[in-house]
Image (cartoon, helix red, strand yellow):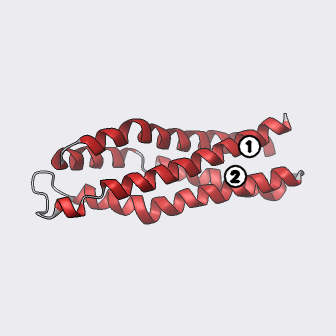
Amino acid sequence: MLEIVVSLVLLANGLAAGVLLGTQLGGWPLLASLPPDRYVHAHAFFSTRYDPFMPACLLITTLGDLALGLLAASPVARVSYLVAAALCLGTIAISLTQNVPVNRWVRDLDPDNLPEDFAEQDPRRRWGTWNRIRTALSTLALLINCAVVGLAL
């Protein structure tokens, strides 16, 4: 049974970290370079593509790491899985409190009728910073999960 949980954790964590890293390397530079109206259109398109995929992957990773942290025989594995779970919880917290509200706000904007003060409200810098942080947290969790599995082989 533990082998199945480990496999699910590695798969879900790898998918989540991969999507976030892909966004960081490709999607984000594109979004940051666009004029406001095209940014709003493109961001709304991108943000709807990852729900509910990303939340499910992060939830599976977190719950799986918590279970593995509680059930692992080795103290090193236990602590490592719990640290990975905490990193994924951090990713979820950032997503829910920082990135998702921006995604919703941008999705509700009309690219052809942006607010007059859009330049002052433009969320790109803040969204990009939080996206880098959650990418780092998710990727670090994946590295820890891989290392624990590697040590067990």
- Residue 59's place in the image compared with 14, above or below, is below
Crowdedness of circle 1 by 10 Å Cα count: few (<14), some, many (20+)? many
Instruction: Tell me how far mark 1 sits from mark 2, CA to CA.
Output: 7 Å
Picture layout, residue 57 above or below residue 115: above
Name the residue at 28% across, 49% down. Answer: 44
* Residue at mark 2: 64
Residue 69, placed above or below residue 42:
below
Circle 1 sits on which residue? 6
Looking at marks 1 and 2 on the same chain, the residue that comes earlier in the sequence is marked by 1
Can you see residue 76?
yes
Q: Is residue 57 visible?
A: no
Residue at the (84%, 33%) spot, across then down: 153
In the drawing, does residue 113 fall left or right of residue 102? left
Q: Position of residue 111 (x, y in %)?
A: 15, 51
Secondary structure beneath label 1: helix
Residue 92, which numbered label?
none
Check disc 2 and report its element: helix, strand or loop: helix
Q: Is residue 12 left or right of residue 6?
A: left
Q: In which quarter of the view is residue 85 placed? A: bottom right
Measuring 65% from the left and 48% from the top, which residue is drawn there?
Answer: 141
Report the front residue among 109 and 147: 147
Q: Residues within 10 Å of mark 2 (few under 14, many from 20)?
A: many
Percent across and percent down for residue 36 are 18, 50
| Residue at 26 percent of width and 57 percent of height | 106
The N terminus, quarter of image: top right
Q: Amino acid at mark 1?
A: Val
151 displayed left or right of 28 = right
